[in-house]
Amino acid sequence: MRSLTRLAAAIFTAALAVLTVAMPAQAITGGEPDGNRHPNVGLIMFYQPDGRFRCSATLVSPTVLVTAAHCTEGTLGKTLVTFKSEIAKEPLAPFPVAADPSKGYTAGEITAAGALSGTAHSHPQYSNFTDLDNWNDVGVIVLDKAVSGITPAKIASLRFLDAYGPPALSKTLFDFVGYGTEVRKPVTGPQKPQPMSYPLERRYTTQPGQKLTEQILQANGNYHDTRGGGGTCFGDSGGPVFLKGSLVAVTSYGYTQNCRYLGGYQRIDIAVAQNWLNDYL
């Protein structure tokens, strides 16, 4: 498994790390630009000791976004948040560089860039991809100021996904949103599909379910699968999985470098996630 966040960030900045064992998540493969379909889904950018990274997140109250714990664990300073659907068609993206990367962003630096600032928190039982039974890859960003004009997403009720076991799961289409890299053939050079960082925009796709465990929803991210529209890729980490209008999971990990296989999504309809989230809502 691989973290899609870190590989996406590496592609995005050409200078960041890629995890090779259990890796936080990715960007939409296939699918289409989201436009204003999901205005409550935002991009977050933050510093960790080994560099600057980006993830996706979902507004669930005027002051709280839900994302993945690997997008919040070890954050230095503040987290930048923007809900712009289209960030940049071509390099470079209009994000500021922290004056002191070892301390991360300050609220002032983020505000001066026209973005929102917030503080990252990780689930206290996040296992950092080491314990399948206690994955808990859930984090939040608590904004310094409340957002207005955006309707927060609804978090699914407790055990919502339990009703979608086999065989119903493989016949159920879930909605996925994020700011990750799109996988496509480059215009020049080798014509092998690969993650492409630009245009940097919010994208949307659908996937059928593949497996459901106590902690994880797996979905079939092969864009050739006629049942769905694509999958997630690098930079989609922390982005939402919706079913029937409710937020049921967040993008957690992937298995392949080209984002063409199964994706793993942390359930947030379970008690260990919801009990912790309720402390912020």
Image (spheres, rainbow, N blue to C red):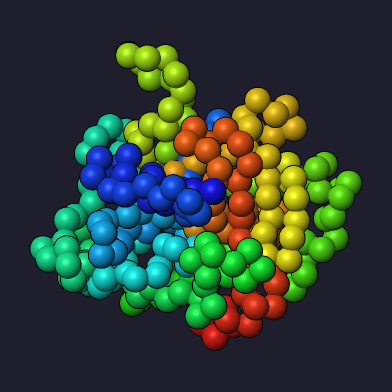
Q: Position of residue 163 (x, y in %)?
A: 85, 60
The answer to whether 154 is drawn above or below residue 201 in the figure is below
Q: For the point 77% across and 70% down, which residue is it? A: 159
* Viewer can see residue 78: yes
Q: For the point 50% across and 58% down, which residue is it? A: 238
Would you say 138 lies left or right of 42 here? right
Q: Position of residue 244 (x, y in %)?
A: 74, 54
The answer to whether 132 is drawn above or below residue 185 in the figure is below
Q: Position of residue 247 (x, y in %)?
A: 64, 61
The answer to whether 118 is drawn above or below residue 209 in the figure is below
Q: Quadrant of residue 270?
A: bottom right
Q: In the displayed image of the protein, which residue is found farthest to the right?
A: 167
Q: For the point 88% across and 46% down, which residue is it? A: 167
Q: For the point 34% across and 71% down, which residue is it? A: 74
The answer to whether 68 is drawn above or below residue 194 in the figure is below
Would you say 29 lies left or right of 19 here? right
Q: Position of residue 55 (x, y in %)?
A: 41, 55
User: Which part of the image, by quadrant, shows the C terminus?
Assistant: bottom right
Q: In the displayed image of the protein, which residue is found farthest to the left?
A: 99
Would you say 74 lies left or right of 211 here? left
